[in-house]
Amino acid sequence: MHLFRKKNVAGVDVDLAHLPSHIAIIMDGNGRWATSRGLPRTVGHREGSETFRRVATYLNNIGLKHLTVYAFSTENWSRPVEEVDAIMRLLKEYFLEACEKMVRDNISLKILGDQSALSPELREIIKRTDELSLQTSGLKVNVCINYGGRAEIVNAARILAEKAVLGEIKPEDIDVSLLSEELYTAGIPDPDLIIRPSGELRISNFLLWQSAYAEFYFTDMLWPDFDEKEINRAILSYQKRNRRYGGI
Ligand code: FPP
């Protein structure tokens, strides 16, 4: 329960009574942030993971319900092995830290993506955070790892096809809700607001199905430079829009 309806950060006010329920973020620009400072790209990813902690803490404090971040796509495996290893290390660090803090902070964690390619160690830690998530009721954080929107839809189509072959469902039973239930995001409401920093104006295979009616916020700011004020700007921009879902 928040005593104040508005949350002001450095002159940017948002209406806490009308927050989006689900914000999704493509954490882009870590590499450029580092190289523009003459630093290795991996330093940008470390800085990006600090920004993620800061933003998640802020959104938990103002009462957001769902936060989804794109941490590693199915296409990111093509990056140099040192960069892939560095991102995996940062994820492991964050998940280990979460095991200590998530119950205290009342945050739950879920991985969206194909976990089969992740190290057994990371999968073991993820299992632990899944168990701890059963004890929490605050912000639900979804981290997309080895995630691709097309792969997610293909996977759901395969599951439904298998069910049809086994006679568990009829092809004509397949509708939006049945397919949604086979996505990694089953049970999670669609994102209301998708934020993409770093000046890129693309969706890059992120939440393709779920973004059907999402509002977008694009900014030139690089992800490591993000803070509470920029998040408030994105929420404020969302709060000024008129969502019609195809109506008038
Ligand atoms: C995109 O920037 C970012 C990534 C592919 C990795 C994101 C990973 C993290 C922020 C670290 C771990 C995450 C958590 C949740 C602890 P880019 O590398 O494509 O940047 P560029 O476009 O400037 O090259």
Image (cartoon, rainbow, N blue to C red):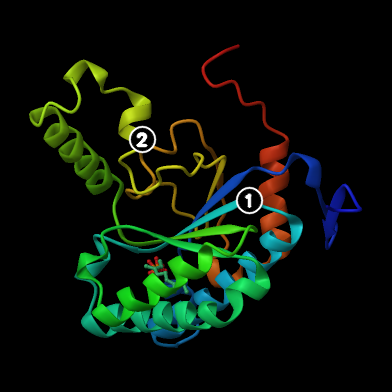
Nearer to me, 150 or 176 = 176
Give the distance between the C-alpha atoms of the residues marked 1 and 2, in whole angstroms. Answer: 19 Å
Taking the spot 36% from the left edge, 40% from the top edge, the residue there is 208
- From this viewpoint, which residue is outermost toward the bottom? 39
- Tell me where residue 116 sits by quadrant: bottom left
Ligand 1 is in which quadrant of the figure?
bottom left
Amino acid type, callout 1: Lys
How dense is the environment of label 1, judged by Cα within 10 Å: few (below 14), some, or many (20 and up)? some
Count of all numbered marks drawn on residues in the image = 2
Taking the spot 59% from the left edge, 73% from the top edge, the residue there is 102
Amino acid type, callout 2: Ser
Q: Mark 2 highlights which residue?
A: 180
Mark positioned earlier in the residue sequence (1 or 2): 1
Q: Mark 1 highlights which residue?
A: 65
- Tell me where residue 224 sits by quadrant: bottom right
* Residue 147: x %, y % from top left: 31, 57
User: On residue 200, which mark appears?
Assistant: none
- Image height of 199 relative to 228, above or below: above
Taking the spot 45% from the left edge, 85% from the top edge, the residue there is 43
Taking the spot 14% from the left edge, 32% from the top edge, the residue there is 161
The quarter of the image holding the C terminus is top right
Q: Is residue 197 left or right of residue 59?
A: left
Nearer to me, 174 or 68 = 174
- From this viewpoint, which residue is outermost toward the right? 3
* Residue 45: x %, y % from top left: 44, 78
- Image height of 177 relative to 185, above or below: above
* Residue 14: x %, y % from top left: 79, 48
* Residue 15: x %, y % from top left: 81, 44
Mark 1 touching mark 2, by CB under 8 A?
no
